[in-house]
Amino acid sequence: MMSTHSTVFGEVDSPRHEADLYDRLENRRVQCNVCLRRCIVADGRAGYCFTRRNEGGRMVTLIYGAVSTWSVAPIEIKPLYHFYPGSHALSFGSFGCNFRCIGCQNWEIAHVGPTRLGVKERRVTLDRAVRISPAQSVEMALRHGCQGLSWTYNEPALWLEYATEAARLAKRRGLYTNFVTNGALTPEALDYIGPSLDGFRVDLKGSRSHTYRRLANFRALDELLETIERAHRMWKMHVEVVTNVTPGYNDSKEELHGIARFIATRLGPDVPWHVTRFVPHLRLSHLPLTPVGTLEVACEIGRREGLKYVYIGNVSGHPANHTYCPECGHRVIERRVHGVVSISLVKGRCPACGTSIPIIGLSPMDVA
Ligand code: SF4
């Protein structure tokens, strides 16, 4: 459900808010410390994401509270399968991205930003936005019967100050919080929101720098991997990893083994890995859909690397969309089209063999 909220920006350019994570340099330049690009920005210019601008030696975010899209969505759609199964999250997106993925599905909001467009286009873009304060976002979630808040659709790290304030308020009202992210936050940015963020649904596009350069024009893969590990180990966030398997780009066995090995060894075998079917978009419109057989090979690779929960996504009705007990193979959660059909856990354990299945936020019925 897309937003039909009526509070539009109209003539207002954008909500300005001084950024919290930046350093002042000589000659009124600043260095942004929100994402791993760590842009150095001259006075009057914007960073790579188009959403943070140096205004007279101060770094300013231009999208505080600027919502391009919102919806009430099942948590399974993120996908998050071991996190409050069957719940709904009020999901928000803004504008801009720190990546330039050549197959981006959300390029209409991710590849634009307040500083990228001319005045006319900027007004059109911002007229599509609604302005929602952190407190309003929490009230909206409660009013819509949601159990949590999710920042998604474009890279939520760009919304750091806004999302952190909303997350703090959400936690006080008993809501869960999560990011659907590319993971390229700096350690400072992760630590900034860490105390208030429960879930970290992160894309991992490849295990080689070369792949990240080709797919996303991004070079700092090692630091990105450290951020994911930090989210999991230091902040105890619930982490699930998604790899959108793109034909000819990241579908080699070597690449997939590398991703699965990273998850198994640095995050742990209980962390879910979703291998999802690529759907042609943008500059990759000429590619085919990922063959189901390739996803099944990826699944097998994940299991061979020791992962206990590997899922196939974007393939309707595939058996690898359900959760099975890793010990006895009993199906413990059945899903259909981004929703839960049934959960047959008993006190969080497999009803057939008693193995504990690591899923947080189960309803009282499933843990009783
Ligand atoms: S968030 Fe990232 S891309 Fe945007 S200005 Fe900061 S360092 Fe640059």
Image (tube, rainbow, N blue to C red):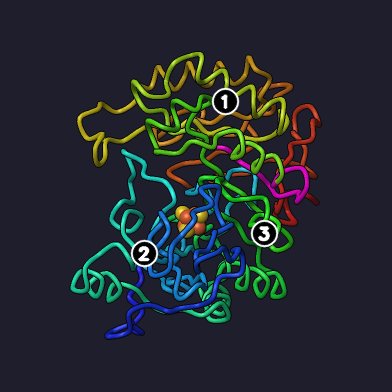
Q: Quick one: label 3, few (<14), some, or many (20+) residues within 10 Å?
A: many
The quadrant where residue 252 appears = top left
N-term-proximal mark, 3 vs 2 = 2
Report the amino acid beneath label 3: Leu
> Disc 3 vs disc 2: which is toward the camera?
3
Could you tell me which quadrant the N terminus lies in? Answer: bottom left
Is residue 71 located in the magenta-colored stretch of the structure? no
Q: Does dot 1 land on a helix, a strand or a loop?
A: helix
Give the residue drawn at x 59%, y 21%: 302
Report the amino acid beneath label 2: Met
Is residue 236 located in the magenta-colored stretch of the structure? yes
Report the amino acid beneath label 1: Ile
Q: Tell me how far mark 2 sits from mark 1, CA to CA.
A: 33 Å
Q: Tell me: residue 157, above or below residue 345.
A: below
Q: Is residue 217 left or right of residue 203?
A: left
- Region of the chain picked out in magenta, as a range: 231-241
Contact, mark 1 vs mark 3 (Cβ under 8 Å): no
Query: Dot 2 corresponds to which residue?
Result: 1
Q: Tell me: residue 266, above or below residue 261.
A: below
Query: Dot 3 corresponds to which residue?
Result: 197
Q: Does dot 3 land on a helix, a strand or a loop?
A: loop
Q: Tell me how far mark 1 sits from mark 3, CA to CA.
A: 24 Å
Query: Where residue 68 sits in the image (x, y, percent)?
Result: 36, 67
Which label was assigned to residue 259? 1
N-term-proximal mark, 1 vs 3 = 3
